Image: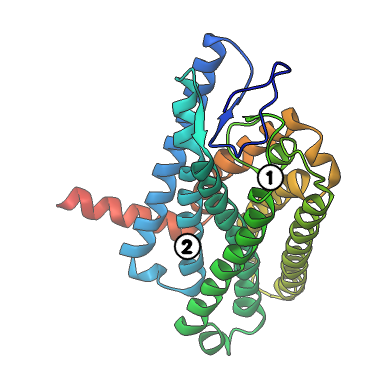
Amino acid sequence: MSPHRNGNLSMMPLQEFVLDGFEGGLQTQALLFALFLALYVVAILGNLTMIMVITLDARLHSPMYFFLKNLSLVDLCYSSVIAPKALANFLSSSKVITFEGCATQFFFFSLLVTTEGFLLAVMAYDRFMAICSPLSYPISMCPSVCARLMLGCYCGGCLNSILQASFTFTLPFCSSNHIDHFFCDVPPLLKLACADTTINELVMFGICGLIIMGTTLVVLTSYGYVTVTILRMCSGGGRHKLFSTCGSHMTAVSLFYGTVFVMYAQPGAVESMEQGKVFSVFYTLVIPMLNPLIYSLRNKDVKDALWRLGQKHTAT
C-alpha cells in the first residue's frame, strides 16, 4: 500500500494504523512510560486487592459488594485493554497496530467503559433500595436479581460497542493511517475517514448522550431519595456511615461521568484531540486507579476486611 506524493494513502483498504500517541522526544516518552506504568500497576494491584478481599471475606458477601467487585473487575479489564499497548509504543519507534487489532481494542474498550457507566447506575439503585426500602431489600436485591442486573450492564455495553464499532470500522480510511491518539478511539478515527462522518458523529453523540443522561438520572433520583431518608434518621452515627458510603460512590460517579461526557457527549470532543488525550488518560488509567482507593479508604467494612485478612496472613 504505497502512499501518494501528497502523503495520503491510496483507496486500498488499510491493513494497519500507527498510534501517534503524545508528542515529544525520548525523554518525554520515557517520562510518559514511567507515569503510565505507575498508574497501571497501582490500578492492577488496587483492583485485584478489592476483588480478593470481597471474595474471601464472608461479611462482604452482599449486593453492594457484589457490584463493587464487578466494578473492580471492569476497571481492571478496561485499563488492561489500553495500557499494555500504550506502554509498548512508548518504547517503540513504529507504534503500529493492525486494523483487526485496532477494531478489537476499540470493541472491548467501548464494551467495558459502557458497562461501567451502567454499573454505577445500578450501584446507586442498590443503595436506594437498601436505605429507602430496607425491609424488602433482601428480596428485591436477591442474588438472582443482582446477577440479572449485572448481565444487563454487560449486554448494554456489548450492544453499544457493536453499534459504535460497526459504524466506525465500516468507514473508508484513505486520508492517512496515523491515529492522533495513544489508543483506537472514535474521535481520532473519524478524522481519518474519507467519507462524510456526520451520521457517525450523530450516532456517537446520540448514544453516548442518551446513556450518560439516562444513567445520571437514575443516580440523581436514587441519591435524592437516599439523602432525604438519611436526613430523617435520628442516629448521627448511622447518618455518618451512610453518607460516607454514598459519598464514595458519588465521587466515583462524578469522576467517571464528568470525563466521559466531555469526551463523547458534546460536539467539541471530535475537534480537540490534545485535550482528548488528557481526558483519556484520566478515565482509562487514573479512574481505575482511584476507584479502589475511594471505596477502601472511605469504607469501614472494606478497611476492617483488609485488617482481618492481614491478621490471618500474619497468623499463618
Q: CA distance from mark 2 to mark 1?
A: 26 Å
Residue 307 place in picture, x, y as percent: 34, 53
Of 68 and 22, the residue lying toward us: 22
Q: Earlier in the sequence, mark 2 or mark 1?
A: 2
Q: Residue at x 55, y 39 (%)?
A: 285
Q: Residue at x 61, y 68 (%)?
A: 156
Q: Is residue 125 above or below residue 271?
A: below
Secondary structure category for the residue under label 1: helix
Image side of residue 79 versus residue 55, left or right:
right
Residue named by callout 2: 70
Secondary structure category for the residue under label 2: helix
Q: Is residue 144 above or below residue 80?
A: below
Residue lying furthest left in this view? 316
Residue named by callout 1: 186
Residue 17 place in picture, x, y as percent: 57, 33
Of 87 and 2, the residue lying toward us: 2
> In this orientation, does residue 190 appear?
yes
Which image quadrant is residue 225 in? bottom right
Q: Residue at x 38, y 70 (%)?
A: 59
Callout 1 crowding tier (Cα within 10 Å): few <14, some 14–19, many ≥20: many
Residue 95 is tagged as none
Quadrant where the N terminus is found in the figure: top right
The amino acid on which the numbered mark 2 sits, given as a three-letter code, is Asn
Callout 2 crowding tier (Cα within 10 Å): few <14, some 14–19, many ≥20: some
The amino acid on which the numbered mark 1 sits, given as a three-letter code, is Val
Eye-nearest disc, 2 or 1: 1
Image side of residue 226 versus residue 109, left or right:
right
> In this orientation, does residue 289 appear?
no
Residue 86 place in picture, x, y as percent: 50, 31
Of 189 and 155, the residue lying toward us: 189
Image side of residue 135 versus residue 188, left or right:
left
Q: Is residue 241 above or below residue 148?
A: above
